[in-house]
């Protein structure tokens, strides 16, 4: 989708979708991975369709595209991105956002969603290791400004 492609990942409730919407508002091409690419694997693992990701990465229609969301199989395509960002939040922020999340959304109950989010927060499980960390407790405009600056796309 882009000449340059960037992955924006993070634990549940870190702001991936919110950042994606702000990037779109600013005119950037965004793929909302949780909505457009994801599915539940046989073992209840959240996955992205690898063939579709690779096809989108090969299309260079836009100067820059941001893929926002998380998947547990991102190691299958992570090396094809020009950069990766991990949105980092404090455990206190995660707990507050989980509590405010609608009960019908993933992580909105005290079941496996919340447990996984807290475990991933503690361990970094499934997150890109070579990514640039962005403080996602700041207001969304500041988070997006930091991403654009690190990507060399600052407006």
Image (cartoon, rainbow, N blue to C red):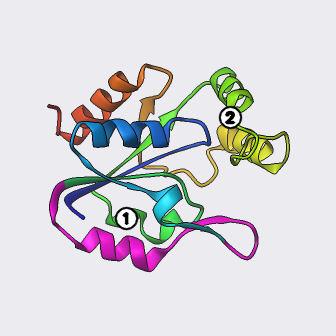
Write the residue at 28% across / 37% down. 25
Would you say the residues marked 2 and 1 are in contact, meaning their CB atoms lie under 8 Å apart? no
Residue interval drawn in magenta = 41-63
Classify residue 44 by image quadrant. bottom right
Image x and y of residue 86, in percent: 46, 41
**In which image quadrant can residue 100 be found?**
top right
- Percent position (x, y) of residue 88? 52, 32
Name the disc covering residue 6, or none.
none
Establish if 93 lies above or below 128: above
Residue at 64% of width from left, 51% of height from top? Answer: 125
Q: Is residue 84 magenta?
A: no
- Indicate whether 53 appears above or below 5: below
Q: Residue at x 60, y 68 (%)?
A: 39
Q: Residues within 10 Å of mark 1 (few under 14, many from 20)?
A: few
Looking at the picture, how far across and down is residue 110, in whole percent? 84, 39
Counting other residues with Cα less than 10 Å from the Cα at mark 2, is it few (<14), some (14-19), or many (20 or more)? Answer: some
- Which label's residue is closer to the chain start, 2 or 1? 1
Give residue 143's position: percent from left, percent from top.
37, 28
Is 66 positioned to the left or the right of 137 in the image? left
Q: Is residue 94 above or below residue 111?
A: above
Q: Circle 1 is placed at which residue position?
A: 79
Residue closest to the far bottom: 51
Q: Which quarter shows the C terminus? A: top left
Secondary structure of residue under mark 1: helix
Which residue is painted at 48% across and 66% down in the image? 37
Image height of 25 relative to 42, above or below: above
In this picture, residue 81 sits left or right of residue 138: left
Please give the label number shown on residue 101: 2
Q: Is residue 61 magenta?
A: yes
- Total number of numbered discs in the rendering: 2
Viewer-nearest residue: 85 or 22? 22
């Amino acid at each position: 989708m882009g000449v340059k492609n960037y992955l924006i990942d993070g634990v549940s409730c870190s702001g991936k979708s919110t950042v994606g919407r702000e990037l779109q508002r600013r005119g950037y091409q965004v793929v909302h991975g949780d909505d457009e690419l994801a599915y539940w694997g046989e073992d209840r693992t959240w996955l992205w369709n690898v063939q579709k990701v690779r096809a989108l990465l090969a299309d260079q229609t836009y100067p820059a595209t941001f893929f926002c969301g998380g998947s547990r199989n991102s190691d299958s395509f992570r090396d094809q991105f020009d950069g990766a960002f991990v949105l980092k939040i404090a455990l206190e922020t995660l707990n507050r956002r989980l509590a405010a999340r609608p009960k019908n959304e993933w992580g909105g109950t005290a079941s496996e969603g919340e447990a996984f989010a807290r475990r991933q927060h503690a361990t970094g499980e499934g997150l890109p290791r070579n990514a640039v960390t962005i403080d996602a407790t700041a207001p969304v405009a500041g988070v997006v400004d930091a991403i654009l600056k690190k990507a060399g796309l600052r407006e």
